[in-house]
Image (cartoon, rainbow, N blue to C red):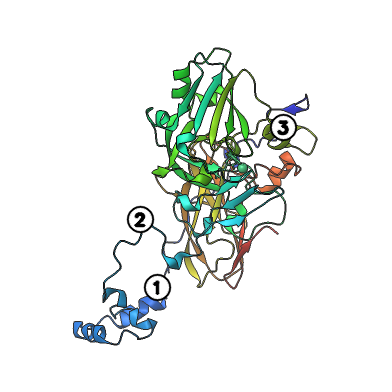
Amino acid sequence: MNDNEVSAPGLIEPRAQQREQAIADKRSTRRNFLLHSSAIVTVAATAGVTTEALANDAAKDATADAAANLPPNIPKWTRSLGSPTASPYGKPSSYENKTIRNMYPGLKEPMSAYSTSPLQELDGAITPNGLFYERHHAGVPQIDPAEHRLMLHGLVKHPLVFTMDEIRQFPSVSPIYFLECSGNPSFLPPYGKTAAEVAGLVSCAQWTGVPLKTLLEHAGLKKEAKWIVAEGADGAAMTRSIPIEKCLDDVLLAYSQNGERLRPEQGYPIRLFVPGYEGNMSIKWLRRLHVTDQPGYTREETGKYTDLMADGRARKFSFVMDCKSIITQPSGTHKLTRKGTHEIRGIAWSGHGKITAVDISTDGGNTWKPATLQEPIISKALTAFRFLFDWNGDEQIIMSRAVDETGYVQPSLEQLIEARGTVSFYHNNAIQPWKIATTGELTNGRT
Ligand SMILES: Nc1nc2c(c(=O)[nH]1)N[C@H]1C(S)=C(S)[C@@H](COP(=O)(O)O)O[C@H]1N2
Ligand SMILES: [Mo]
């Protein structure tokens, strides 16, 4: 680190005042959702069907074609018994085989790999554990919890080594938080085709664990304690420094995710969880917490996550993930199959706290209207949003813009590049446009 490195260049200022005043919702009340849908018309046309007809149908040959399962017929799965409980650990329906992580094995080094959450297939704000994004610098270690220890040492009165059983005996909490990789995604082309390719290095779960503060109070912090250097037990021994104020605030030692123990790929048996901060600080497979009076300036901090700007200066500690959102439905590779009203759906989040608004533009950013936010709106968690819009068959560009409780408004890519350049590709929270073609097909609106 040298004098050219400063703590906060490249910041995008809050600009809530500049947000369009004229976003009053002028949505039409006349909606033509599925009124022209053939499915509904079919039901209406056959509404007068008698129970006798249904009974006759039930007796029909089970080998009849697929239409035999449609109303008013009784489908074949109603006319027979289902299988008993399927397996000790449940799986999604076999018809949902598109809802899988995109795998990107092996970046530059072998075992340095990642996978993305299929955002365009997911609903709501909680990511199922099997679809949580992954980022590993040296692969996924298989750790026996009985042999795993967490060491807490340095500027503490009582250096301690904990077993997993001991950690689970401390009072616990179960907050909901998002986790996002700072490389989600690069500023530079090629731009992704799907929402997963554009922003799939973000996920959200309910994390159960012990507040780090509890363990620090147990060990007794010395007054010189200013930082904690956390180290993983994987082959990368990934190591990052966290300011003591954050450690005493909301940092967690997490051992469970959405009710079950962490998955090996998420850091089993224990990970650090640093809410709202860039994902690489949430050290997985946590084995050591070293309390110090200064940052560790570790390999990951000097060589990697200190973002170089165009003018040669660097953003030294770019911890917090700024406010961001993305439309996930409809999004790239989806297709609108009819004109009329569609629900735009998406997710918004901010490492600074709660989402207060999401605006939608359906005209390439010229005008904006507010989306409806799904309760509960949780600080540093994904917030789902919805918005009804009418597609008249023209080419249209749709995009979302989130605002958080600090008044910060999600920037455009142009604003971000102006503030930071493109040397470092971390922390891209730009507005994401999707283009609807006259055929109804959606592609990335950024070309
Ligand atoms: N020990 C260790 N911790 C780690 C990493 C790693 O490679 N090793 N990857 C980091 C990065 S870059 C991110 S974005 C998050 C990803 O967490 P996830 O795989 O649970 O999504 O873990 C972080 N913690
Ligand atoms: Mo990351």
Give the label on residue 302, or none.
3
**Who is closer to the viewer here, 191 or 373?**
191
Q: CA distance from mark 3 to mark 2?
A: 46 Å
Q: Does the beta carbon at disc 3 come under 8 Å from ligand 1? A: no
Give the label on residue 35, or none.
1
Q: Earlier in the sequence, mark 1 or mark 3?
A: 1
Residue 111 position within the rendered picture, expressed as x and y whole percent measured from the top left: 65, 48
Residue 282 position within the rendered picture, expressed as x and y whole percent measured from the top left: 55, 36
Residue 321 position within the rendered picture, expressed as x and y whole percent measured from the top left: 59, 38
- Which residue lies most toward the front here? 147
Residue annotated with mark 2: 88
Tag 2 secondary structure = loop
10 Å crowding of disc 3: few (<14), some (14-19), many (20+): some
Amino acid type of the residue tagged 3 in the rendering: Thr
Q: Is residue 329 left or right of residue 86?
A: right
Write down which quadrant ligand 1 falls in. Answer: top right
Q: Is residue 115 left or right of residue 378?
A: right
The quarter of the rendered structure image containing the C terminus is bottom right
Up-down: is 37 above or below 132?
below
Tag 3 secondary structure = helix
10 Å crowding of disc 2: few (<14), some (14-19), many (20+): few
Q: Earlier in the sequence, mark 3 or mark 2?
A: 2
Q: Earlier in the sequence, mark 1 or mark 2?
A: 1
Q: CA distance from mark 1 to mark 2?
A: 43 Å
Residue 72 position within the rendered picture, expressed as x and y whole percent measured from the top left: 29, 80
Q: Is residue 412 left or right of residue 65?
A: right
